[in-house]
Image: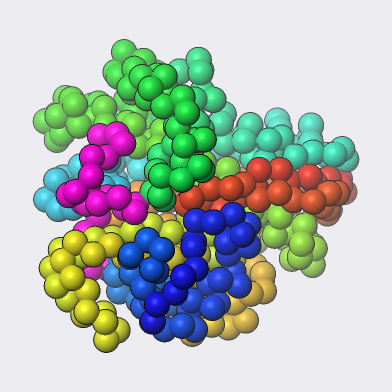
Amino acid sequence: MVSEIDPFCEEYIRDPYPFHAQLREAGPIVWLSRYEVWSVFRYQEVSSILQDWKTYSSGAGVGLANFRKEKPWRTPSLLLEADPPNHTRCRAVMSKVLTAENVRRYRAEFEREAARLVPTLLDRALDGVRDVAEPYVMKVFPDAVGLAEEGRRNIGTYGGMNFNSLGPRNRIFLDATRNEAEIKEWVTRHCRRDHIVPNGLAGQIYEAADAGEVTQDEAQLLVRSFFSAGIDTTVDALGNALHCFATYPAQWEKMARDPGLSRRGVEEALRFESPFQTFFRTATRETELAGSRIKEDDKIMVCVGSANRDPRRWQDPDSFDIERRNAGQMSFGGGIHTCVGQIIARLESEVLLTELAKRAKRVELNGKAEPKIHNTLRGFAHLPVTLHSR
């Protein structure tokens, strides 16, 4: 099946779900003629590609660009844009730092910040992204990592550059990278050991370097991973969750009656409005997928946002239901490249939603939500809400 649909045009970005449905029904694998790449939108094919790193490589880049043929816009990630054996060694260090046991040490700090922030938000017009999600995530995550206070806004800017670079070099990418040299210099400097606050997650990576598990240069690139992926996706996840609960008020009522449902609320919001919509893999050899011949070096766009709403996998997938059994939702990817930071992202989101559920009886949209125009992530540029107190 060949399609002329452009997944990076503004119409698609604003409301991708009708396009997802069309492309799922077009077939298990679709050739996107505009970019000359394959694409998969069904759950089964998305899952099979993510599980098979030997055939579908991340090392050639997880965006539209093929690093075997094009120069990356910055030094590739040791986690996101690498394959074994180097990926295995470096991920082992990051996984040891981001274990559930280690991350749980930060729960009390996350809860204190949520308890401080939420009372200031009630019963007034807010932007759910700018006033709720961003200040919370921009405080608790950099504090946990051990990043200096100065210039933290640059982290979000860098994340925007990083994820927009996974698409074409379009206007969206050019807008995101207009201060590229300045931001990259700031990030490089603040990933160095002398800019890291001791005892945080970043400091633990440098301790692993001291133990010889990675080199000092590799440690700096692993710390950069916190800058690349630690802010945007969680901010978008929380903003998307607020939009879901405002749109489906009965689901908020359930959670307000039982804030212990917040964890399930997080998971359903991730499935329903996946912050990470798409990424790419590159074929390492000629192969066949769902009856189509894939050539070596072909790019395949993998749409997890569509897989998370595939009716072949989910019952009534276009409804938001926090009591759904949604094990297997793919917002954090799959296989050996599954997001290594998902434990801390889930904890941040659960803690804030729990505090909101304890204090707010209703989340109300009080204006038009404006999706952000982004090559890869789904979130809101503007989310006008009111959090009505109990």
Image location of residue 351, percent across then percent down:
60, 45
Image location of residue 295, percent across then percent down:
18, 70
* Residue toward you, 224 or 287: 287
Image location of residue 360, percent across then percent down:
81, 48
Q: Please name the predominant secondary structure of the magenta segment in the image.
A: loop
Magenta range is 51-76
* Residue toward you, 269 or 298: 298
**Does the magenta segment cover residue 172?**
no
Q: Please determine whether, in this image, residue 2 is positioned above or below residue 228.
A: below
Q: Please determine whether, in this image, residue 57 is positioned above or below residue 197.
A: below
**x 19%, y 26%: residue:** 217
**x 63%, y 31%: residue:** 135
Answer with left or right where residue 1 lies relative to residue 65. Answer: right
Image location of residue 185, percent across then percent down:
36, 19
Residue 91 visible, this angle: no
**Does the magenta segment cover residue 53?**
yes
Q: Please determine whether, in this image, residue 176 is positioned above or below residue 277.
A: above
**x 30%, y 74%: residue:** 48
Answer with left or right where residue 258 lies relative to residue 199. Answer: right
Q: Quadrant of the N terminus?
A: bottom left
Q: Please determine whether, in this image, residue 218 is positioned above or below residue 12.
A: above
Residue 209: quadrant of the picture: top left
Residue 277 visible, this angle: yes
